[in-house]
Image (cartoon, grey):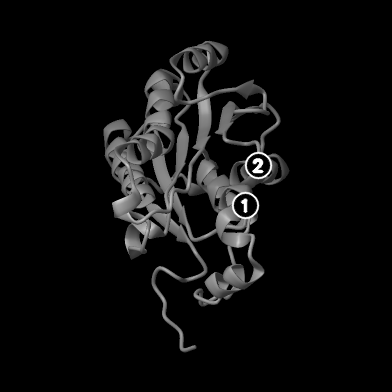
Amino acid sequence: MSGLVIIMGANGGIGESVAQIWARDYAGAGDEVITSGRATGDVQVDVTNADDIAKFLAHVGDRPVKAFVYAIGSIVLKPLKNAQDQDFLNAFDVNLLGAMRILRGLEPNLKAGNAAVVLFSSIAVQQGFTNHTVISAAKGAVEGFAKALAAEWAPHVRVNVIAPSLTDTGIAKPLTSSPQMAQAIANLHPIARLGAAQDAGEAAAFLMSEKSAWITGQVFHIDGGRSTLRVKG
């Protein structure tokens, strides 16, 4: 079935990869894709700005939405003693509330299109890493939100989450700009490399498609085995 596909955060990294993979492998003849970002894309949206969100929703109008991806996020790494209230509020605003605001406004469109929704979390929610209290709290909220929403909107809308390990994208540069640090982190994975945007992008495109029609309310760890496996060094 053709329809409208929305990919938010498609101006780099995982979101851009999702858009490319969808166009290459899954797009139907009648599909229309809307990409958004803060600086690029078909529509520029600051998900913390009510006026931007209203303009975006007006742009979508009453068209049924077939798939929705929210690939907007942040990485905040601080020990709790250095984390301010505003750090937590900002992380929740971008990672959770931005998605919530858009999804709330698109509810009729998503239900009309029997849509698939894909959100993004982090391996840090399950594992518990030092200096990750801010981002783990925000991404943990994303996982809880997604599962509740999957139940609330069933059977019309499927909602799933991808939880990657560290992925070599622009947002991760503070951790990957040092070759020594990047290699040390890569070696923590049973498949000893950092994630690539395509790794999560392939999973997201599959979850957007009708090939995953009986999958909802799940969190998929795309993490080179780090969340479940331990190998001898």
Q: Position of residue 149 (x, y in %)?
A: 31, 36
Q: Where is residue 169 in the image (x, y as percent from the top left)?
A: 62, 52
Which amino acid does the dot numbered 1 rest on? Thr
Q: In which quarter of the image is residue 11?
A: top right
Write down the residue under mark 1: 169
Instruction: Tell me the residue at 41%/59% (across/down).
Output: 123
SS category of the residue bearing label 2: loop
* Disc 1 and disc 2 in contact, CB within 8 angstroms: yes
The numbered disc on residue 12 is 2
Q: Position of residue 190 (x, y in %)?
A: 51, 77
Q: Position of residue 22 (x, y in %)?
A: 65, 42
Mark 1 surroundings within 10 Å by alpha-carbon count, few (fewer than 14), some (14 through 19), many (20 or more): some
Mark 2 surroundings within 10 Å by alpha-carbon count, few (fewer than 14), some (14 through 19), many (20 or more): some
Of residues 100 and 154, the one nearer the viewer is 100
Instruction: Tell me the residue at 47%/48% (across/down).
Output: 75
Q: In which quarter of the image is residue 216?
A: top left
SS category of the residue bearing label 1: loop
Which of marks 2 and 1 precedes in the sequence?
2
Quarter of the image with the N terminus is top right
Which amino acid does the dot numbered 2 rest on? Gly
The numbered disc on residue 21 is none
Q: Which residue lies furthest to the front in this view?
A: 82
So how many labels did they put on this image?
2
